[in-house]
């Protein structure tokens, strides 16, 4: 059985099967990539929500104290590496 695409081209069953297989593999590859991207973004969202909760809790407890007050704490900057998310 032959499938006709145009007047001069005919696609046999093997070529059609190979084409369908290639399209299926391509679709699965894209779906897998999108899934891993969604999982990565979900992880980043959860991390950001936890940081926001920590900041809200800190503000509710009086926030950052300035150095001029007695018994004040120094606030150290926190560096976060985003290399693991690339």
Image: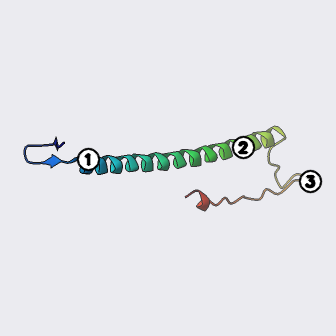
* Residue 23 placement, left or right of 38: left
Q: Residue at the spot x=43%, y=48% of the render?
A: 30
Quadrant housing the N terminus? top left
The label shown at residue 50 is 2
Q: How many marks?
A: 3
Quadrant housing the C terminus? bottom right
| Color style of the picture | rainbow
Residue receiving disc 3: 71
Q: CA distance from mark 2 to mark 3?
A: 28 Å
Q: Residue at the right extreme?
A: 71
* Pointer 3 local density, CA inside 10 Å: few below 14, some 14–19, many at least 20: few
Q: CA distance from mark 2 to mark 1?
A: 51 Å
* Residue 52 placement, left or right of 12: right
* Residue 57 placement, left or right of 41: right
SS type, badge 1: helix
Residue receiving disc 1: 16
Q: Tell which circle, 3 or 1, labels the residue nearer the N-terminal end.
A: 1
């Amino acid at each position: 059985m032959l499938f006709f695409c145009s007047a001069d081209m005919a696609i046999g069953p093997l070529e059609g099967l190979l084409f369908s297989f290639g399209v299926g593999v391509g679709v699965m590859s894209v779906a897998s990539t999108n899934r891993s991207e969604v999982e990565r973004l979900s992880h980043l969202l959860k991390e950001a929500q936890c940081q926001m909760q920590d900041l809200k809790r800190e503000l509710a407890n009086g926030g950052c104290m300035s150095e001029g007050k007695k018994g004040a704490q120094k606030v150290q900057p926190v560096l976060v590496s985003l290399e693991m998310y690339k």
